Amino acid sequence: MQSGRVRIADIADELGVSTATVSNVIHGKTKKISDETVKRVQQLLEKRQYMPGMAGILLAQNDSKIIGVVINDHEKYEGHTLEDPFISASVNALAKETEQAGKFLMLKVTDRWDEIPKFASMWNMEGMVMIGYCEQDYKKLREQMHIPFVVYDGYMEDLGNLVNIRSDHFDGGAQAGRYLKNRGHRAVLCISDNHVCMDMERFMGLKSEIPNAELLIIPMEQKARSIFYRAHLGEIKKYSAVFAVSDYYAMDVIQFLKSVGISVPEDISVVGFDDVREGEKFVPALTTIRQDSRQRAALAVTMLNRLRKGDGEVSHVLQPVTLIERDSVSEVKMHKEEG
């Protein structure tokens, strides 16, 4: 027997039985094995302090207890997908909820939808949470995967065997607009890297409260964004407040404004969206729209379990959002309101 970790083959050789017999005893498949052989195998496993590979045990079971979390490696993350505050908060919440449910979380970051079915099949997953993909990807995945999955903020009509959990993006934008309006702001700029889906809903919510709010499409890449801000500084200075569609962009624009001598919130107020931890510690502490990552993760795990058992409804679920008031918004200065 080789030194180091004990293998199934080592146990089989010592007892003069097949590796299949030892493996079946380990996984509890003993109906066709004599009681005497089962006992001999178990005793030697204990004596040799055999540590089974967890993956092997899970894959041999009908209920693997593995939940996959797959995140789109979108170009806007510039190779740092898991460092994005919203993504990291979502993964952290899912990790806590899966552990509490007695499940295992397995994470994959990819921009290729065709890698996802292989990933699910390889690990015998019982369900999956998908973040950041588009409708055509979900359609292809439904055709190739038969396990239930939950989507975060998907935009689709025909759901199939999945639940789509969406934050109330329109209401979040409306809450931000109402708050800014009550603080005297009328000239409000919304910044986003696109004008579709959830970001457009947030902007339209803002406009429902501040009809003359404008949308400025900014570059995804950080260096290009800084150059863009400098080129549009004169335009930005016309506004008393900026509503960023994410906390990441809110903190980014605050840093830029500081670098060119513009004070936040004294000169320009800023509101974000997500309520990531970094925003609370930021200077000034960021006023934002909170998406409850823990609540969403708990719902995702619950719905996966229901779908798997066949007693869950395939549906869109709308999750409420809440405005969190901090220090990045001030009362508007009269000259800004008049301008």
Image (cartoon, grey):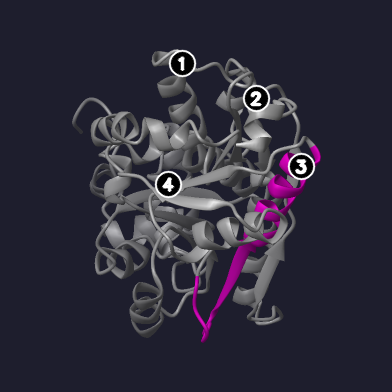
Q: In the displayed structure, would residue 262 be above or below residue 90? A: above
The kind of residue tagged 1 is Lys
Q: Secondary structure at mark 3?
A: helix
Q: Residues within 10 Å of mark 4 (few under 14, many from 20)?
A: few
Q: Quadrant of the C terminus?
A: top right
User: Where residue 40 appears, x then y in whole percent?
Assistant: 44, 49
Q: Nearer the viewer, mark 2 or mark 4?
A: 2
Residue highlighted by disc 3: 179
The reply to whether the magenta stretch includes residue 314 is no
| Residue at x-position 42% and y-position 63% | 60
The kind of residue tagged 4 is Met
Dot placed on the residue nearer the N-terminal end, 4 or 3: 4
Give the spatial CA distance, label 1 vs label 3. Answer: 23 Å
Residue highlighted by disc 2: 328
Q: Which of the 4 image quadrants contains residue 207?
A: bottom right
Q: Nearer the viewer, residue 49 or 133?
A: 133
The kind of residue tagged 3 is Tyr
Q: Residues within 10 Å of mark 3 (few under 14, many from 20)?
A: some
**Residue 143 at least partly seen:** yes
